[in-house]
Image: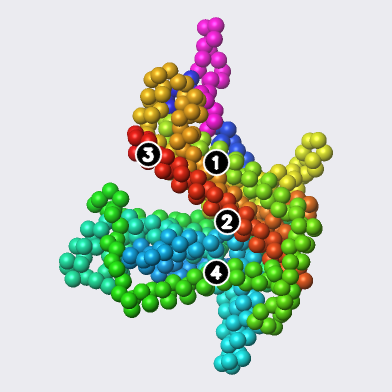
Amino acid sequence: MSDSFQPTRPSGRFTLFPRLSGVALTGLLIAIFLMAFLILPVMQVIYVAFLDARTGALTLQNFQDFFNTNLFRESFVNSFYVSAMSVVFATIIALPLAYITTRFTFAGAAVIQSLGFIPLIMPPFVGAVAMTLLFGRNGSLNLLLDQYFGFKIPFMEGLNGVIFVQSLHYFPFILINLSASLRNIDRSMEEAAQNLGSSGLRMFRRIVFPLAMPGYLAGAALVFIKVFDDLGTPLLLNVNNMLAPQAYLRITGVGINDPMGYVISFILVAFSVFALWVSLLFMRGKDYATVQKGGGGLAKRDLSQREKVLAWGVILFILALVLSPHFGLLLLAFGTIWSFSPLPDGFTLQHFGTVFTQSSQYIWNTIIYAGSAAVIDVILGTAIAYIVLRSGLIGRKWLDYMATAALAVPGVVLGIGYLRMFHGVELPFGLGQMSSFWGLIIVALAVRRLPYALRACMAALQQVALSLEEAAESLGATKSSTIRRIVVPLMTGGILAGFVTSFATAAVELSATIMLVGRSSDAPLAYGIYLFMQSPSGRGAGAALGILAVVIVALGTYLSQRIIEKDRNRRAAAPGTDH
């Protein structure tokens, strides 16, 4: 706003510092927070990547050493290959589900979409262990194939296993975004194509899919970035010749001053930014607009009996595949011994007893860390959304850019940045070094999940009519009172959605937390699962912890959806509030 920075003249004299309005002060504090805990740590990593440790001068020698090392070159190629192939296979999984449930009159479409979202509530590295027992060389499926047909399929061998796990875990990003795009396609576009003789696969390839491209690319870019970022899955599958595991191993093994860890971190950030840039570049100059508001969606048609059988066959096969990690996790959590056999030898509750008697601290830590991070995110998200959409504050767009930039920063890179930046910084009251303080885990989770909460808050505020605020202020309400009593209550649904999304994803975060856990007593759930999964004897307890993680996130998601639905119905019933 134009009066955000107003010099004051008390007693007729000019003051050196201007008085900041509430909006300007809030924006300044948020900018300081993002600079301290996102921008500067990442810049520190980038700076060290170009730093000659002996002379202190800037150099490209570190990058030359990187590309002259066979292991690092191989890791670079492998990470790009795994990310690209994961996008391909995630597309193969998501496309039929999205198209069938949006294109045809299909009973249970909402249930199918909901089941397709379930993989996101399980940490991918947990699914990796379960899938090894189901699809590994001596897993259930290959044992049966070998027994009855005399051959095995290398589902989980080397990079294949990483691609398989990541595709099944992250395909919902494509499913959600592609389904939304298909629902918003202008129905008249399809009708015009049909009038010109186009139908079937040709119309899908030439008309439908190109119009849905923005949603598809948004989901595909997220899958690429998430796979490139992921650390736990390659580590648990013992695939260390990828960039994220190499960055972790160099910093934790060689030391905090090892330049290769920072070079790898720089490359991870660069390729995450590259993936986002390519998706934006691909859409630049292309028109995906619809003629009607809302588009009307694709014209749904009924399926013949033969088509229904085929569609259900495809859907059930895909759902069985994508839900197999959860099935395997259940068997592992309740099984006694599961080795070289299609199913466990027996079943027991002992693993859950181990969790509640020996590892309950992991659960409480997760609730505290993820809950605190989610609260921070919705507060920051609401404030940034208001500043960007409702104020004229100079530089307000940069708050949005800085917060969203966290999407392009892999968790392992942020963790390395914190270790480097806060190493040796002593906290007061005997709390020890800041780099090993548990509060830094909360900050890391909040920064990592802020973009999700921000987008939800942005969407919620855009649905609040500006005239409601103007009416309140015309009746004498102050700006702060209007925000507190009018704006925030009307944003409840979006704020809650942002809270749950941040909580659910923070609860299963490993990449950043694995770098920042100073003591076992400070470890969250994901880290505890990772520790248990290191040895066959601990996998049962690790699977039990994984089940608890899934239940916590699923229950929170369900309750939030119920509250959001009630809020939406209330807004629809109240005249003049839904715009």
Picture layout, residue 182 above or below residue 137: above
Q: Amino acid at mark 1?
A: Val
Asked if the residue at tag 3 contacts the one at tag 1, i.e. Cβ–Cβ closer than 8 Å, the answer is: no
**Residue 285 place in picture, x, y as percent:** 31, 55
Q: Quadrant of residue 397?
A: top left
Q: Which mark is residue 378?
A: 1
Q: Nearer the viewer, residue 30 or 363?
A: 363
Picture layout, residue 475 above or below residue 244: above
Q: Amino acid at mark 4?
A: Leu
Q: Quadrant of the N terminus?
A: top left
Q: Which mark is residue 554?
A: 2
Q: Residue furthest right?
A: 430
- At numbered mark 2, what does the secondary structure look like: helix, strand or loop? helix
**Residue 139 place in picture, x, y as percent:** 64, 80
- At numbered mark 1, what does the secondary structure look like: helix, strand or loop? helix
Picture layout, residue 12 above or below residue 27: above
* Residue occupying image coordinates x 50% and y 25%: 480
Q: Specify the segment rendered in magenta.
A: 7-27
Q: Nearer the viewer, residue 23 or 421?
A: 23
Q: Which mark is residue 323?
A: 4
* Residue occupying image coordinates x 33% and y 55%: 184
Q: CA distance from mark 2 to mark 1?
A: 20 Å
